[in-house]
Image (cartoon, rainbow, N blue to C red):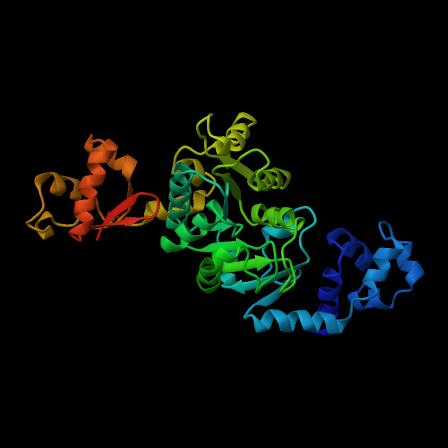
Amino acid sequence: MDDQRLAYLALAQVPGIGPARLETVLAACETPIGAYSAPFEFLCALPGFSRAAVTALKTASIEEGRRLVDAAERLGGRVLLTMDAEFPKLLRTIPEPPPVLFALGELRHLDPPAVAIVGSRDHTGYGADVCRLLAAEAAAVGVVVVSGMARGLDALAHGAALDAGGATIGVLGNGLGVVYPSANRELYERVASRGLLLTEFSPGERPHAGSFPRRNRLISGLARATVVVEAAVGSGALITAGTALDQGREVLAVPGPITSPVSVGANRLIRDGATPFLEPADLLQHFPECERIVRVQPPSPPTEAAALPESLTNEERELASLLGAEPVHLDDLVARSSRAAGDLLSLLCGLELAGVIEQRPGRLFRRR
């Protein structure tokens, strides 16, 4: 980085100098280095600048910017400034976009369209099934899954997207090099190696109460649509839904039992106008270009019945004939076969043990 960019980076990381103040001081001083040399009283006269804020600003230096770049690179990451070509285009359009991002992983995952999947840490089995299904469906059409790397449904969304061969972006409420929660260390490493980790916090910075609302606005800001799977009253997922609405983005919610505490927030979103997520088509309508890609793909050739093991029962052969290379959800198999879900699961288990089929995340099944 040249000195102007290093100066910009250091200014952007000064505590209390948020995006709005940074824009104000750069407009007044023309360049980042100019902000360092501007007189103290001149800076104090700028709108929104107290003497304490100016004192903090005066601590910034080019050397501090260089230290931040070196810290990110030691972790294998890099720094993105808002003027960089690789900086996420959608984030430039949100209120008070982050001036700086620290990235670890594949920047190419910033190019395709993305969906944010968020939900409760203390979720139900139903919420877990829907989350996996949703992430797998998004991955199948090339939509990147964005979430917050938190315990619970966030972690399930990231993992299901990777398991389905798709891409995922984890937005951190702390700096690179800090794994929070610590139980997500394996997920952190998976996303860093196969997806992308993003944060606006300096490398090594620990999370604090105020960092998560800031993170949430980036989760929704990166995505064309946000889906709330399960959310109790006061859940952080509802904060993400709110930032999505403020940013003019679509919000979908998964309906749940009115007796379930973790479905109260999602059900209220639907009552207040959010789109109910009832089937994959409810999501795909917001990504028409990805749906077209799927539609023009040639169908997989059917597997010959003769290739099935002779040990299979007639019921297993009949069920196997309903499956091809493309994953099919259990509910679809119930509709096609007119069998109860419990009976199907027993037959599917036998087919999986025989090596005929494989199960994918979200109760999806396909022929091997």
The image quadrant that residue 99 belongs to is bottom right
> Which residue occupies the foreground of this view, 180 or 273?
180
Percent x, y of residue 211 = 65, 51
Percent x, y of residue 22 = 77, 56
Q: Is residue 42 left or right of residue 274?
A: right
Is residue 256 depicted above or below 109 in this figure? above
> Which residue occupies the foreground of this view, 335 or 291?
335
> Which residue occupies the foreground of this view, 287 or 315?
315
Identity of the residue drawn at 86% across and 50% down = 47
> Which residue occupies the foreground of this view, 198 or 128?
128
Percent x, y of residue 304 = 12, 49
Is residue 132 depicted above or below 332 in this figure? below
Observer able to see residue 169: yes
Identity of the residue drawn at 46% across and 34% down = 254
Q: Is residue 2 left or right of residue 136?
A: right
Is residue 131 depicted above or below 253 in this figure? below
**For the N terminus, which image quadrant?**
bottom right
Identity of the residue drawn at 69% across and 73% down = 66
Residue that lies at the very extreme toward the left in this rendered image: 310
Q: Is residue 367 left or right of residue 233?
A: left
Is residue 33 depicted above or below 185 in this figure? below
Observer able to see residue 356: no
